């Protein structure tokens, strides 16, 4: 049986009367990359902070890296690399100075040699004397990942690490994450990007503090029960309001130049779509529902 890096049940956190995380169960096998998805304010960051011991859970039980996440949080912190949403290093220090300071905080043996090796691994050697505050978003991200790796963690918790980063930097970042996973590291990464979610072994979707769905991307799409049709043509921009409230239509919205019309009642949806097939200025085709279709549908359901 595969060992679990994270195995928690009933994870709950309240802030006054607001339930930020509501009895969430998460079980992540060692060495896998899991995507943690959900809209802003859904409870992703709060969950991550509870797992790594920065927030105390109000309810729940289980383990993180084999340690009780409620009573052994200090031991967990020493084995976890946590990358926050906001760049949280000293902008008036160089990359090397930041990493050497972090290495000393963690009590890393031979910190200068460890920093040297980490700089080389993450392609930061040529920039090591550059001030952190002068780095672009992609290089700040790379430096933050380097800081997370200095103490050789067994688990990475990454909170929207690629927000505001250009596509190439995002791709390079994910290549590094998969290289680390191949060496046995477990990764839980929150993201709003669907292409990043599709790079994960499995995904967890949380909404209003509740776990809504989880599994492989293919499983999540299949279990949604959605049917999706695309409509393209010069007049398509004027059609979206026509579908609101129509039988079988749960959601209609644009993805690029195409209008996606989705719903779970396939027969009703096909009946609604039928008149548009006869129009010479439009092209109607059935499409496999995308992950974005599914998540928008879940949000609309919750609303």
Image: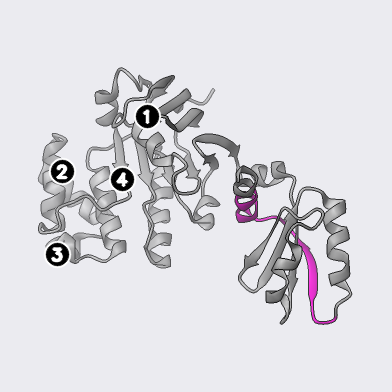
Give SS at disc 1: loop
Q: Quadrant of residue 168?
A: bottom left
Q: Which mark is residue 145?
A: none
Magenta range is 280-297
In magenta segment, residue 294: yes
Instruction: Name the residue beneath numbered marker 4.
Output: 83
Q: Residue at x 72, y 53 (%)?
A: 250
Residue 256 place in picture, x, y as percent: 61, 71
Q: Which mark is residue 16?
A: 1
Q: Earlier in the sequence, mark 2 or mark 3?
A: 2
Give SS at disc 3: loop
Specify few, some or many for label 1: CA neighbours under 10 Å numbering under 14, 14-19, or 20 or more.
few
Instruction: Name the residue beneath numbered marker 2.
Output: 102
Vertical relation: 16 (above or below) 181: above
What distance separates the C-alpha of mark 4 from that of mark 3? 21 Å
Q: Which mark is residue 130?
A: 3
Give SS at disc 4: strand
Q: Quadrant of residue 56?
A: top left
């Amino acid at each position: 049986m595969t060992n679990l890096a994270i195995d928690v049940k009933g994870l709950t956190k309240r802030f006054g009367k607001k339930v930020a995380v509501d009895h969430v169960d998460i079980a992540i096998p060692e060495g896998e990359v899991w995507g943690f998805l959900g809209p802003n304010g859904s409870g992703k960051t709060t969950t991550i902070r509870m797992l790594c011991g920065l927030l105390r859970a109000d309810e729940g039980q289980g383990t993180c890296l084999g340690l009780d996440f409620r009573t052994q949080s200090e031991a967990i912190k020493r084995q976890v690399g946590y990358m926050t949403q906001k760049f949280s290093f000293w902008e008036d220090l160089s990359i090397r100075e930041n990493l050497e300071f972090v290495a000393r905080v963690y009590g890393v043996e031979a910190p200068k040699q460890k920093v040297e090796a980490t700089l080389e691994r993450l392609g930061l050697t040529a920039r090591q004397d550059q001030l952190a505050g002068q780095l672009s978003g992609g290089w700040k991200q790379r430096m933050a990942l380097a800081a997370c790796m200095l103490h050789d963690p067994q688990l990475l918790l990454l909170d929207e690490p690629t927000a505001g980063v250009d596509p190439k930097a995002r791709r390079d970042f994910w290549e590094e994450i998969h290289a680390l996973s191949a060496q046995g590291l477990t990764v839980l990464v929150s993201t709003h990007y669907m292409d990043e979610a599709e790079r994960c072994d499995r995904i967890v979707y949380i909404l209003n503090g509740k776990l809504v769905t989880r599994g492989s991307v293919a499983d999540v799409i299949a279990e949604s029960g959605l049917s999706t049709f695309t409509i393209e043509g010069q007049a398509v921009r004027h059609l979206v309001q026509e579908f609101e409230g129509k039988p079988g239509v749960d959601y209609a919205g644009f993805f690029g130049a195409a209008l996606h019309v989705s719903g779970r009642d396939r027969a009703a949806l096909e009946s609604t779509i039928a008149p548009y097939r006869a129009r010479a200025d439009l092209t109607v085709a059935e499409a496999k529902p995308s992950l974005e279709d599914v998540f928008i549908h879940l949000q609309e359901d919750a609303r």
